[in-house]
Image: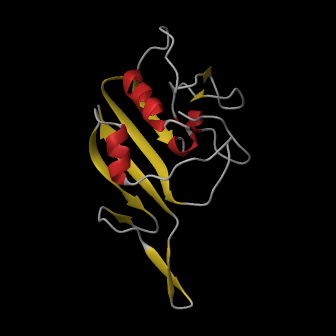
Amino acid sequence: MGSHVYEDKEDRRQRYADVVGVDMLEGPGVDLVLDLERDLPGDVGQFDHVECMSVLEHSRRPWLLAANIQRLMAPGATIFCTVPFCWRIHGYPSDYWRMTPDGVRELFPEVEWTALMLASNELTDGPKAPTIKRNDHPYFSRTETVGFGRL
């Protein structure tokens, strides 16, 4: 999900032999154009694994997008999901949300998460985001919510 290749980003489809790049916009890295906030066409099929990396923050209604991702997952399918928690605002085309591990868990109620945590310079499953100190003042580190789960 979110396979459109921007600037110097990697075309993640090259990592796997049998993959379909899905995005809401046509362009490089995209095999199937779908707006996952809308009803799905009947001929999309199901997937054994989904990578949803830095996509949810760009959705106006991520709960609809997440529900459709779950519909597209075959029974027993796996998902790897990353979404910013503390991050700069960025386009592609717009940027709306930041999410905690609990927020991601709520978006994907049918997924059993093996791991769902905050990632910065280190992984933590604690309730606090990592901080850094600059001039003796604490600041949040650039942090993502990262998870791996199974339907």
Quadrant of the drawing holding the C terminus: top left
Vertically, is 75 above or below 105? above
Residue 50 is drawn in which quadrant? top left
Q: Residue at x 42, y 71 (%)?
A: 130
With 96 as the anchor, is 90 left or right in this view? right
Q: Position of residue 30 (x, y in %)?
A: 64, 27
The number of callouts visible is 0
Nearest to the observer: residue 61 or residue 11: 61
Residue at the far top: name it: 42
Vertically, is 2 above or below 53? above
Q: Residue at x 46, y 48 (%)?
A: 82
Q: Position of residue 58 (x, y in %)?
A: 58, 42
Residue 126 is drawn in which quadrant? bottom left
Residue 59 is drawn in which quadrant? top right
Q: Position of residue 52 (x, y in %)?
A: 48, 39
Q: Residue at x 62, y 22 (%)?
A: 31
Q: Position of residue 46 (x, y in %)?
A: 41, 18
Nearest to the observer: residue 118 or residue 98: 98
With 18 as the anchor, is 100 left or right in this view? left
